[in-house]
Amino acid sequence: MTEFITSQISDEIFFKISELENEKNKLKQNKIAKEIISELDIEDFRPYIAYDLEGNIFIALNYYYSSNGIDECLMTRNHDATITEDGVYIDDESFLETLKIGYLDDIKISREELLKEEIKGHQKEYDKVSDDLEFYNNHLIQLINFERPKYVGNFQKITEIDKEIEILEQKISDLKIKLENLN
C-alpha cells in the first residue's frame, strides 16, 4: 500500500512537500499545503492538512474505508497515512487492508440481500401472472367445452381471452429471463 501511494505522487509534489517542511512562515505553509492537496489524487485516500505538536503543517491521508473521519484523526493525531519529503508512512498497513476487505464484504452482503428482495418481487409477479394465465386457460376451456364457439359473443370472448393469454405468456417469458439474469 505504501508503494502504491508513493507511485501516485509525482516528484513535483514531493518537491512541494519538501518546501512545506522547510518553510517556517505559517501562511506560506498553508498556501503550499493547499496546492499539494489540490494536486493529490490517490485512489481510496483523501488528503488533508494536519498539524504537528509545534503547529507546523504536514499532509496526511484519510483512508476511504477507515471508521475514523478526518476530524477524528486531527483530534487524536492518529492519521491513516502521512506524506513527508522522505516518503509515505503508514502505521498499520494490514489494519487498513482489513478495513477495506470488511467494507467490501459488507457491500457484497447488502447487494446479495437487495438481489434476493428483487428476485422475491419478480417471483411474486411471476406467480401472479401464472395464476392469471391458469385462470384464463380454464375459462377458455370452459367456453370451448360448454358453449359452442360458433356464436359471435362466445367467439369474441375466446378471442379476448386468447389475447390475454398471449400477453400473460409474454410476461412470463420476460420474467423468466429477468429471473435467470438475476441468478
Image (cartoon, rainbow, N blue to C red):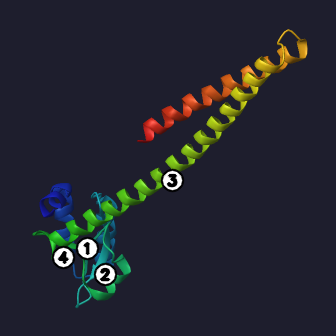
Q: What distance separates the C-alpha of mark 2 from that of mark 3?
A: 38 Å
Picture coordinates of residue 56, whole percent (x, y): 24, 84
Question: Is 125 situated left or right of 56 in this image?
Answer: right
Circles 1, 4 touching at the beta carbon (< 8 Å): no
Q: Marks 1 and 4: which is nearer the front?
A: 1
Question: In whole angstroms, how far apart are the C-alphas of marks 3 and 1?
Answer: 41 Å
Q: Nearer the viewer, residue 148 or 76?
A: 148
Q: Earlier in the sequence, mark 4 or mark 3?
A: 4
Q: Which residue is mark 4?
A: 21
Q: Earlier in the sequence, mark 2 or mark 3?
A: 2
Residue marked by disc 3: 117
Q: Is residue 133 visible?
A: yes
Could you tell whether 83 is left or right of 49 in the image?
A: left
Which residue, given by chain and number where applicable, does mark 1 sit on? Answer: 60
- Foreground: 183 or 159? 159
Q: Nearer the viewer, residue 105 or 2?
A: 105
Tell me the kind of residue under disc 1.
Ala
Question: Which residue, given by chain and number where applicable, does mark 2 sit on?
Answer: 73
Kindly check if marks 2 and 4 are in contact, taking CB atoms under 8 A apart as contact: no
